[in-house]
Image: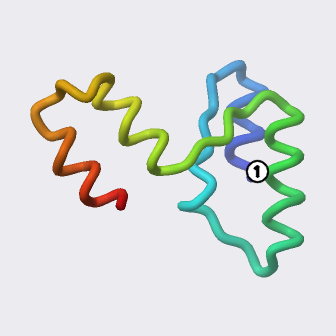
């Protein structure tokens, strides 16, 4: 969280892959996500990132990635 907040302060665009993050407790994790979102970070999941990288279903590895996601 601290690194992401520092990057936001430096005016970087910050995307946090929420299902790749952990904390000591669910409550702490959720509070960090709320704080990050409130400061301008985009909260996404690995599935969202994977499909955004591919752009379209016509991408040569779309079906392979779809299989991984399912």
Looking at the image, the residue that sits furthest to the left is 60
Q: Residue at x 89, y 35 (%)?
A: 38
Q: Residue at x 63, y 32 (%)?
A: 14
Q: Is residue 6 left or right of residue 56?
A: right
Q: Is residue 10 left or right of residue 20?
A: right
What secondary structure is marked by label 1? helix
Name above or below for residue 51 compared with residue 13: below
Name above or below for residue 61 compared with residue 11: below
Q: Residue at x 25, y 29 (%)?
A: 57
Instruction: Tell me the residue that label 1 is attached to.
Output: 2
Q: In front: 63, or 33? A: 63
Q: Residues within 10 Å of mark 1 (few under 14, many from 20)?
A: few
Rendered-image quadrant of the C terminus: bottom left
| Total number of numbered discs in the rendering | 1
| Residue 41 percent across, percent down from the top left | 72, 33
Task: Determine which quarter of the picture holds residue 39.
Answer: top right
| Residue 4 percent across, percent down from the top left | 69, 42
Q: Is residue 38 left or right of residue 43?
A: right
Looking at the image, the residue that sits furthest to the bottom is 24
Task: Determine which quarter of the picture holds residue 68.
Answer: bottom left
Name above or below for residue 38 compared with residue 33: above
Q: Residue at x 67, y 41 (%)?
A: 43
């Amino acid at each position: 969280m601290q690194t992401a907040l520092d990057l936001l302060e430096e005016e970087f665009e910050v995307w946090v892959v929420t299902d790749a993050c952990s904390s000591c407790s669910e409550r702490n994790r959720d509070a960090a996500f709320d704080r990050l979102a409130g400061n301008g970070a985009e909260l996404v999941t690995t599935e969202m990132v994977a499909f955004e990288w591919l752009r379209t279903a016509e991408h040569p590895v779309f079906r392979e990635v779809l299989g991984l996601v399912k």
